[in-house]
Amino acid sequence: MLKGISPLISPDLLKIMAEMGHGDELVLADAHFPGYTMCANVLRADGLRIPELLEGIIPLFELDSYSPPLIMMAAVEGDALDPSVETRYVAAMAKNLDVVPAVERIDRFRFYDRVMEDAFAVVMTGELAKYGNIILKKGVTPVG
């Protein structure tokens, strides 16, 4: 156990976040996401919900300031989003950020393509919320 690091952050997740560079993307996936189909680098966080993971990750993870750092899936035509999902995620991040960047929503298949092409890793969580996946784009840690 390390001081100042949430016990929800596994050693493997801590290693992944340390290995990531500027512009790399980490996907926090809901329990239904086809993570193993989309990415070779998959971690398990079964039973953990995304808001709690965000509370542990955000103090350790600089979000990108050059492009949208938070990306979620848009609802499929004819389907509806539960706005409380994004609200819970933003509230979790706001505990450690003065300003939470806007969440960008992209089409389901664009989201899948982005994960397949750009994801450094996918964390499979126990999140059950529909459209509960979120991509975090890593930024540059400020000096000083």
Image (tube, rainbow, N blue to C red):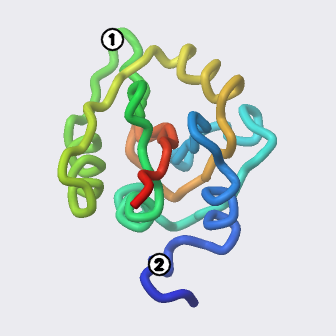
Which residue is depicted at the point 67% across and 45% down?
A: 121
Above or below: residue 113 compared with residue 69: above
Q: Position of residue 133 (x, y in %)?
A: 47, 39
Q: Mark 1 is on which residue type?
A: Gly
Q: Is residue 118 left or right of residue 132?
A: right
Q: Residues within 10 Å of mark 1 (few under 14, many from 20)?
A: few
Q: Residue at image x 66%, y 28%? A: 118
Image quadrant occupied by the C terminus: bottom left
Question: Of 32 and 137, which appears nearest the observer?
Answer: 137
Q: Position of residue 46 (x, y in %)?
A: 58, 64
On the image, which quarter does residue 86 sit in? top left
Give residue 5's mark.
2
Residue 12 in percent (x, y) is at: 70, 67
Which residue, as the protein is rendered here, is positioned at the far top? 77
Can you give x and y, in whole percent of width and height, for residue 115 in the image?
Answer: 63, 29
Q: Which mark is residue 78?
A: 1
Q: Name the residue: 50% across, 74% down.
A: 8
Looking at this view, is 110 or 66 the one in front? 66
- In terms of secondary structure, where does tag 2 sit? loop
Alpha carbons under labels 1 and 2: distance apart:
41 Å
Residue with the most extreme front position:
144
The amino acid pointed to by label 2 is Ile
The residue lying at 25 percent from left, 55 percent from top is: 97
